[in-house]
Image (cartoon, grey):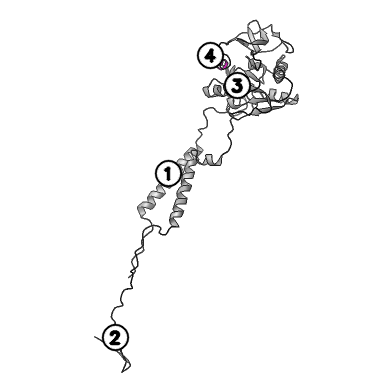
Amino acid sequence: MTPPAQPLFSVRLVAGWLAAAALTCAVSLTFLVRDDGPAHRPDEAGPTIYSRSALGYAALYHTLGQLGVPVGENTAESMPMRGVAVVVIAEPSDEQSVLAHVRDTLRRAPAVLFVLPKHRGKADPERPWMLRSDRLLPLESVQRVLTVLDDRATVDRFGAVRTWSGHEPLPAAPDTNASQLVHGDLEPLVSSRDGVLAGQTPHRRIVVVSDPDIFENHGIARGDNARIAVALLQRLRGDGTGRVVFDEVPHGYVSHPLGIVRLLFTFPFALVTLQIALAVGLLMWSAAARFGAPRQREPALPKPWPRSPYRWDQRQHRVFATR
């Protein structure tokens, strides 16, 4: 009688594998659909060239392009400086990671237009390119940003400034609200008796703009703001060659090169890689000499046939029973 066939795997082992696969799949889906992006998210309605809000820089960016100034943007953590004449760092936050990037850019860039922050806005959920509300930043936050450039400089805010001084060829009629001015070791380019609105550092590589109203969408068309913005950038460009690049990394727009191998071992995709490795292991196991539970070995010699109760009589040519 043939013995019953044994299963390849025990019921307990199969149940364990299925439970582990279901748990791994659930964990993978949880992390894939969870919205846990970087702590520093892109500011859609903030001071970026992509923003059409009141605090955005889209108007300045496109104005420069229409004037024939080659412009571009940077979203790489380590900006390539080839062909770059001026880097615009517009209103970075006072987060340590952002300030570290700003320090590196100030050190490597050929020339920098450094715009201090003044407002922070909140995007409208229904229209994320527009502002729902905005507020003035505390001066302590602005001071921390200014310290990256000069730890002895100070910043303060004043009411309406009526008298401005502009150094040729810069016009002297900016239009700002609650003017934010700097006191420090700067060569004044646009200033008042209360402080400096735009000033150049002693090594003449960096121009600091204390009040961003003259660059933002809401204020660039007022007074001589647009003329001042373009004149400052042209002054930094020098001979008029090279691009003006707006650095958008401080605002959360960071692009990473796609590396397939690195992606496979980055969480949560590493869970998928683990599942593939397990599947390959099972496939190799199934292709081996034995898969699953061991079979019963066949006997080395065949079993003897049972003695027959009948016998053939050669003489009589007949079959007769032996017992």
Chain-order first, disc 2 or disc 4: 4
Q: Is residue 260 above or below residue 40?
A: below
- Quick one: label 4, few (<14), some, or many (20+) residues within 10 Å? few
The x and y percentages for residue 8 are 38, 58
Q: CA distance from mark 3 to mark 1?
A: 49 Å
Q: Nearer the viewer, residue 241 or 142?
A: 241
Tell me which segment is drawn in magenta: 141-146
297 on left or right of 279: left
Q: Name the residue carrying label 3.
A: 107
Q: Quadrant of residue 139?
A: top right
Q: Residue at x 36, y 54 (%)?
A: 11
Judged by depth in the image, the label closer to the viewer, 3 or 1, is 3
What amino acid does circle 2 point to? Tyr
| Tag 2 near tag 4, CB within 8 Å | no
What amino acid does circle 1 point to? Leu
Chain-order first, disc 3 or disc 1: 1
Q: CA distance from mark 2 to mark 1?
A: 67 Å
Q: Name the residue carrying label 1.
A: 23
Q: Name the residue carrying label 2.
A: 310
| Tag 2 near tag 1, CB within 8 Å | no
What amino acid does circle 3 point to? Arg
